[in-house]
Amino acid sequence: MGRILLVLRLVAADVRRHPAQAAMMLMTITAATAALSLGMSLRGTTDTLYRQTRAATAGPDVVALTPGGDKAATSALRSLTRAPEVTAHSGPHRQYYTTVTAHGLTSAAVAQGAGAAPGPVDRPLVTSGTWVRPGGVVVERGFAAALRVRVGDRVTVAGRSLPVTGIAVGAGHPVYPGAQMMGPGGGPSDYSGLVWMSEADTGPLAAAGLPVTSLLYLDLRDPAAAQEFVESRRQFGDEHQTNFFTWQFMAEDDARILRQGQPVLVIGSWLLALLAVGGVATLAAGRAAKQTRRVGLLKAVGATPGLIAAVLLGEYLTLALIADALGLAIARLAAPGLANPTASLLTAAAGPSDDTVAATTCVALAMAVLTTLGPTRRALRTETVSALADTARRPGHRPWLNGLSALLPTPLLLALRLIARRPGRAVLHAWSIAVMMIGATALLMARVQTDFDYGLGSSHLGNVQREQGHNVLLAVTAALAALAAVNIVTITWTTALEARPVMAIARTLGATPGQITAGLSAAQLLPTVPGAVLGVPLGLFLVLSLSPQNTVVPPTWWLFIPVLVAPLATAALTAVPARLAARRSVARTLSVETG
Amino acid sequence: MQDAVLAMLAKEPSHGYLLRERLRRALGPLGESMNAGQVYVTLTRLEKAGLVASEHAEGLPDRPDRKVYALTPAGQRRVAAWLSEVSWPKPNLAEFHLKLAAAAAGRLADPVELVDAQRRELMRRLGEAQRAVLAEPDGSTAGLLLEGIALRLQADLRWLEACERVWSKVVDESEDA
Amino acid sequence: MNEFGAVLQARGLAKEHGQGQGLVRAVDEVDLDVPAGQMLAVTGPSGCGKSTLLHLLGGLERPSRGEVRLAGRRIDALSERALARLRRRSVGFVFQAFHLVEELSARENVELPVLLAGRSPRAAKKRAAMLLERVGLADRARHLPWELSGGQRQRVAIARAMANEPAVLLADEPTGNLDTAATLDVLRLFEGLRAAGQTLVIVTHDERVAATADRVVSMRDGAFVDDTRLAGHATGGLGEMFGLEY
């Protein structure tokens, strides 16, 4: 017990002494686990949202559709209600294929006739305003969001201007823009939105001769057996081509429509995890020297290797677990919005599944262990005395690099020698930049793809699916950029801290603070170039391998933008920490070294 | 010095000038100021005491530098006794200490100034010794003698520092009183 | 050189840390003239301000008050940049902890200031070889600092300090980490430099190091309490001084 307390106390003391490093590690791992958890739970979330909406709106188990609005069509549907498996039904209703215009945007839409009070099956939930009444329309929420209409706005349905009395969510149609289910005359369906109107108001639509489809909502005794019911019916629909939509199919369909963001998130989360590994490794390596000394002290007072390992790993593991919890919480908050961008389903919290929790926890712990295991093992292996004397981690001697740098101006000379001190640091840095460049390239690629939209001739009616993809990609890229920035600052600061005595010596030998600042910056800038040069083709390759055949490749010079921006951003990010490090008093640094 | 001269003869009988050479070599820079007369004075005294016997070489004038000196049995005993002896020169600090005490008590002089003057003198001597040490090659046995002198002077200087520290306080307090 | 013939000159030099109750006068109104070619030792107990004085003289720290002139030029008000340039050309530092760059070989360490001064790699190499030869470490040129003994490291550090032929060599406890034999090696080097006309200021608490100087200044609490000229004042020969009795 006392030992556990000691470990906790040592861990807590260390976190208190280095709050910035702890926060940085927390942030890094959180970003990775949040993205991973989002990517993994997105599919499940859509499913959950559909189920919730279905439960809240008495969603049908099966929707049966037959082209045409005449007696023959409806009677064919009515015959279904007599089937023994059917426990309840609503309809038949008619949906007319028309257009809806609002705020100058025109979209294809189906207008469905509805009673003043909905039937027992499919009772759309009015989220604002009231249910249909003569002389007004209710707009499906996803469609309303796309058209940007609210209750009280006027919309033009088939040339007739009507007020929007309400906005509702239902489970009787796939989410926007999949409302049609069946095209006119039983043909293929097209993207369109959904509005509900009173039966009376659909009269003019029928009179105008608009194509129409009849549809019937059915509840079955066994909702799980919807597929069997549909299959046994299909053969009887010869004369009238009746088509069926089971609720399971609609759930699938919704998920498919909204899935665009998923690969981006999953791949993005891996990229974030890779960056996080880079960042955490830098932090861990930067602290290794101090850590070794600390281990020496602990050994000197009689701590066992087990206890020391517990102290060293304990801190990182604890931080990783906290970060994991944070990431999962963020994912839980963000998932509904990402899974339901069209707002066509009821938004309610949908927690990550057990699988997701297990996976993110594993990844978080793995990141902590992988990046700290090396330094921890090294620290444990070092002999007590040399650990105390801090001679364990001698930088290697690289004569050829030192010789090469002798030919260069002072800042570059210092930079190359800094890189020679800790080449691993430069590799980590190049790695961060490469990962960042992959994200940036993906974003560039996405920008140049030709968008198609749902609107009829008005490009302003966004393609939700694609917009969603863009937004997710933008968010992932922003997260990548933020993490890469944190990494760069961390690396610069760590390098500056480690190189402090050397830089102080250089200053006693006559290097100016400006030269030191430039040297520290240049030490970070040099690895940026290979990182960027490697990252862009990798990103291109990744995007092309995951994209359809007709993917447009942006002009080559576009691809040079990130390659140029990366060094500039690095220079800007390193300037401040490098300058701060260069301003430190030489006399103090050297006397600390002596003492 | 007498014992050292005796011990130098223990190996084999020797001419006076050879003896002097041996002594000078052992003393290194310190022996440079040593002249022949001093060695012969010592040898003559030893001979009178019956510790050394001299033999006059054939056909040469009867001068000390022509004589060959050898140990008598009494001389040999004396050398053996000297070698086994563990006496050590006593540091004579009492005199200087009393000088300071007397100066302070009788207000004859400022003890701190006396200390400072002494320190300057010792510092100069240490400088000489230290330069002589530096001039000696590595591993020289004569250098060891200089090293010992330098170390002693260093110890004395540190003692003077302590003297100064304490006496300056004593003086301050008596002035305050 | 200025009209006083002093390479290094300080007037009313003061350095204070902290304020109010916690004010520490590390160096307290010190005047100092170091003529060209002089080897000056500054002694005193630890914490007396001797290291701070050295830092002020070499432009590693800025004084609170007073002025410092190096080769006639005021350096106390120079910018960091100008100070760096000045150190490059005119000041060589030697520290107790050696402060060699660990990942550079002995030769590369010595080359460093030459390269910083903007000279060609070839010139740096030549100069380093010459200096290492002079400190007796020509055969250790490729060794890394940790492969060298303390005394050898300090000799490399001295070679490095001499790399740009500085007007003054400033050494802070140069023998503080060395054993007797290594101390002698370093002192012999200093002796050789002095013989060649090099101006040296050595801060030390070791009387034996101080005694080899031309002049010893003692410091207490940031001020000079004594200033003794040693050279040429010895009273008689060694034998007389150290009492051979016959």
Image (cartoon, helix red, strand yellow):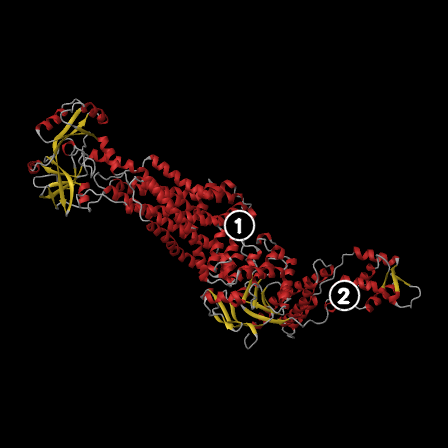
Residue tagged 1: A396
Residue tagged 2: B31
The percent position of residue C50, horizontal first and vertical second, equals 55, 65
Kind of residue sitting beneath label 1: Gly
Using the image, name the chain to which the residue with label 2 belongs: B
Q: Is residue C222 left or right of residue A56?
A: right
Closer to the observer: label 2 or label 1?
1
Residue count near mark 2 (Cα–Cα under 10 Å), binned few <14, some 14–19, many ≥20:
many
Using the image, name the chain to which the residue with label 1 belongs: A
For residue A388, say whether it is visible. Answer: yes
Q: Given the current orientation, which residue lies at the most extreme top position? A: A84
For residue A27, say whether it is visible. Answer: no
Disc number for residue C91? none
Q: Secondary structure at mark 1?
A: loop
Q: Secondary structure at mark 2?
A: helix
Kind of residue sitting beneath label 2: Gly
